[in-house]
Amino acid sequence: MEFPDLQESWTQELTAEIIADWLESWAILNNKTLKRGDLLHLIPWQTDETNFSDRDVKLESNIWSTLKSRQQQLLASWPFHIDSNKMTRREGRHKSYWIIYLYLLFISSKQEVTSEDRRNFEYLCIELIAGWSGSNSYRIGFPALRDEPAGLQDRINIYAKKSHLIGYEVKFPVLPTDKDLGLDGVFWQSFRDRRSGGPHAWLQCATGRDWTTKTMEANNRTIMNHIDPASGVLRLLAIPFCVVVPIANWHRRLQEAGVIFDRTRIAELSKHCDVSSQTYELLNLRIASYGAILAT
């Protein structure tokens, strides 16, 4: 498998989660069954295969346990199936699903996500969530792109006009130095009478592994100084990582972030709605630029 950017993972702390992501990408790109025994030659262990250290043995066990935990918690939304000591790709998923899932793996593995990839991730999530929910949507994120006005206040004003917010809900102007205040995308439903009061949702996208510290709760207090829908706002968080944690931890994350769209949930949305041809092509080209060819 030629995917040099994923190989950067080995310069990070060698964790079972990072290696599990890498193995998922291997299974997608090669469309092969991953056997537990394959870990001996696929992973660049610090010792040779015939002389595993105790640390290597423990890590190998943790890697396989991580993969099995994903299946146990995520059920059929996880695009692989583990039977005995082998992992295979699930059938019935179209090529665009695998392109999206592979792209999410790609940016999950990077130590430094480029601004281009962050923007692509924002557009991907906004388009999928809007298509899935049937909502109107608009990108607020910085920097402005695709004919969006450069100023944050201008983008907020467009959002307010499109969603029929009234003067009471559009408050103090943002500061000249404000970029997006952590608000990447907005969604709303409108009524035919064009009065305000429809449901709103605000999306934050986080591509760093420190995403648990970047929830919308603190940002919302600042944003609501400037725009505050009277009917309230549902908080959304999109991340390219696979979240498998104990139920108590998951509950805490939801309290802090609102609705969480992790890697499997984002990819699942593509089974019910399409992304724009422009966004899809950007993802496809980005993957291809690193020498990756999707096996179908």
Image (cartoon, grey):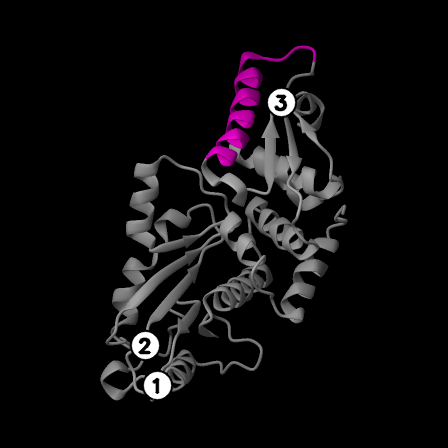
**Residue 52 appears in the figure:** yes
In the image, which is nearer the foreground, mark 2 or mark 1? 2
**Badges 3 and 2: C-beta atoms under 8 Å apart?**
no
Q: CA distance from mark 2 to mark 1?
A: 9 Å
Image quarter for residue 135?
Answer: bottom left
- Residue that numbered label 2 is attached to: 198
> Mark 1 belongs to which amino acid?
His
Q: Which residue is mark 3?
A: 85
- Quadrant in the picture for the N terminus: top right
Residue that appears at 30% across and 68% down = 233
Q: Residue at x 28, y 76 (%)?
A: 229
Q: Residues within 10 Å of mark 2 (few under 14, many from 20)?
A: some
Secondary structure of residue under mark 2: loop
Q: The disc labelled 3 sits on which kind of residue?
A: Asn
- 23 or 34, which lies in front? 34
**Label whose residue precedes the other's in the sequence (2 or 1):** 1
Q: Give the mark, 3 or 1, whose residue is nearer the N terminus.
A: 3
Which disc is residue 164 wearing?
1
Compare marks 3 and 2 and give the one earlier in the sequence: 3
Residue closer to the observer: 185 or 207: 185
How far apart are the alpha carbons under marks 3 and 1? 56 Å
Q: Residues within 10 Å of mark 1 (few under 14, many from 20)?
A: many
Residue 246 drawn at (x, y percent): 36, 34
Residue 82 locus on image (x, y percent)? 59, 30
Q: Amino acid at mark 2?
A: Gly
Report the front residue among 155 and 82: 82
Quick check: is 176 in the magenta stretch? no
Which region of the structure is painted magenta? 50-72
Tag 2 near tag 1, CB within 8 Å: yes
